[in-house]
Amino acid sequence: LAKTTQPISMDSYEGQEVNITCSHNNIATNDYITWYQQFPSQGPRFIIQGYKTKVTNEVASLFIPADRKSSTLSLPRVSLSDTAVYYCLVGHSGSARQLTFGSGTQLTVLP
Amino acid sequence: EAGVAQSPRYKIIEKRQSVAFWCNPISGHATLYWYQQILGQGPKLLIQFQNNGVVDDSQLPKDRFSAERLKGVDSTLKIQPAKLEDSAVYLCASSPLRDRGPREQFFGPGTRLTVL
């Protein structure tokens, strides 16, 4: 199974940019990288997905280097409401690996 | 667009009792997933359906857990008999069917099960 490694926790202050890096050394050629956000007592929520280089949407950016062995989720100007657990997953349609959640990164945004 | 619905939201039972959870996916989503999330851990896939067929149930404890998806829409997950270690949040998710590329999952709010 594809294994991902993320920091267990991170602290930040409101208004700062937060970068969470995920390591996935055995990513396969047709694997995509997906990030989810989870608040307490809620199911995970899709944030962003990418294959290579850079992807940006209204809430985040995803940076993927050429070797694709890692990826960085970037949250611009975080607020208190961004306090949550963030999960990195790798895989593709038809592969159970895309459904393997690690322990995630607990991001705490401080005032 | 309505999201994934789950019921009940909370359930407390004693060990060796039975319990069932219900999930209604987003309309038109062919794929449905059941996850178990133990406190402090990431969700663990229990079973994946595509329409009404099982795609992957390799991590489903089949001696006590069962799931069905009648008519390829709603799904139920049952535990019989429950053990203390089954205390967790049970999440249902759905996704549209795609032949290739990434697949985004939409999660319901979950059912929190406490086994005493």
Image: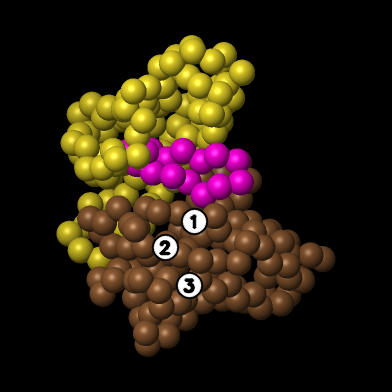
Chain colours: A brown, B yellow
Q: Say which residue appears at 43% left-offset and 81% top-offset.
A: A64
Is disc 2 in contact with disc 1, using a CB cutoff of under 8 Å? yes
- Residue B94: x %, y % from top left: 34, 45
The disc at residue A12 is none
Amino acid type of the residue tagged 1 in the rendering: Gly
Question: Which SS class for mark 1?
Answer: loop
Residue carrying label 2: A3
The span picked out in magenta is B33-47
Write down the chain letter for disc 1.
A
Q: Which mark is residue A23?
A: 3
Q: Main secondary structure of the magenta part?
A: strand
Q: Position of residue A56 (x, y in %)?
A: 46, 77
The structure residue drawn at horizontal position 51% and vertical position 60%, both measured from the top left corner, is: A87
Residue B54 shows in the view: yes
Picture quadrant of residue B28:
top left
Is residue B109 depicted above or below A80 in this figure? above
First of labels 3, 2 by sequence position: 2
Q: Residue B52 in the image: x percent, y percent? A: 20, 34
Residue B59 vs residue A91, the one in the foreground: B59
Q: Residue at x 36, y 62 (%)?
A: A2
Label pair 1/3, CB-CB below 8 angstroms: no
> Is disc 2 placed on a helix, strand or loop?
loop
Q: Is residue A101 magenta?
A: no
What residue is pinned by disc 1?
A102
